[in-house]
Image (cartoon, rainbow, N blue to C red):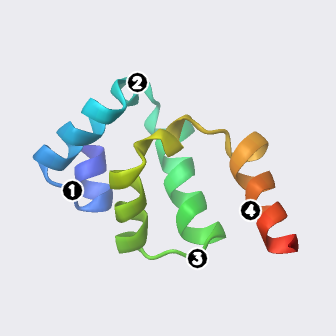
Amino acid sequence: QWLEERLDLTTEEVSKLIWKLPTLLCCSISDNMELHLDWLKHRMNLSTDQVRKIIKERPQIFSYSIDDNMEPTLQWLENR
């Protein structure tokens, strides 16, 4: 329900996310999902619609470490 509200997803869309990434059911909202969504939105300057699209296509992003993977990758891309 939290993802439905936060990203304006339907129940069917959330079901598809869980199908793609079953471990999503084990993810903490405050320690994982919320941090990832905020990072995407603020660090990458994405709109809610853009974040929604990314999550729908690649829910695996919740399994990536922000500090060890996402941030260093973005910094590398910015410095190219």
Q: CA distance from mark 4 to mark 3?
A: 12 Å
Disc with the residue nearer the chain's start (2 vs 3): 2
Q: Is residue 69 above or below residue 5?
A: above
Q: Which residue is mark 1?
A: 9
Please tell me which of labels 4 and 1 falls first in the chain: 1
Amino acid found under the numbered disc labelled 4: Leu
Q: Amino acid at mark 2?
A: Thr
Q: Earlier in the sequence, mark 3 or mark 1?
A: 1
> What residue appears at the point 38 percent right and 31 percent down from the top-left corner?
24
Please provide percent x and percent y for residue 14.
22, 43
Dot 4 or dot 3: first in sequence order is 3
**Quadrant of the image containing the N terminus:** top left
Q: Position of residue 25 (x, y in %)?
A: 34, 26
Q: Residue at x 76, y 55 (%)?
A: 73
- Is the residue 73 above or below the residue 45 in the image? above
Cα separation, mark 2 vs mark 1, equals: 18 Å
5 to the left or right of 66: left
How packed mark 3 is, by other alpha carbons closer than 10 Å (few <14, some 14-19, many 20 or more), is few
Say what amino acid the circle numbered 1 marks.
Leu
Regarding mark 3 in the picture, which secondary structure is present there?
Answer: loop
Other-residue count near label 1 (Cα within 10 Å), few / some / many at <14 / 14–19 / ≥20: some
Mark 4 highlights which residue? 74
Query: Between disc 2 and disc 1, whose residue precedes?
Result: 1
Find disc 3 in the rendering and name its residue: 45
Q: Earlier in the sequence, mark 2 or mark 4?
A: 2
Residue sitting farthest toward the front: 80
Q: Is residue 63 above or below residue 7?
A: above
Q: Residue at x 78, y 67 (%)?
A: 77
* Residue 60 drawn at (x, y percent): 47, 39
- Residue 23 shows which numbered tag? 2
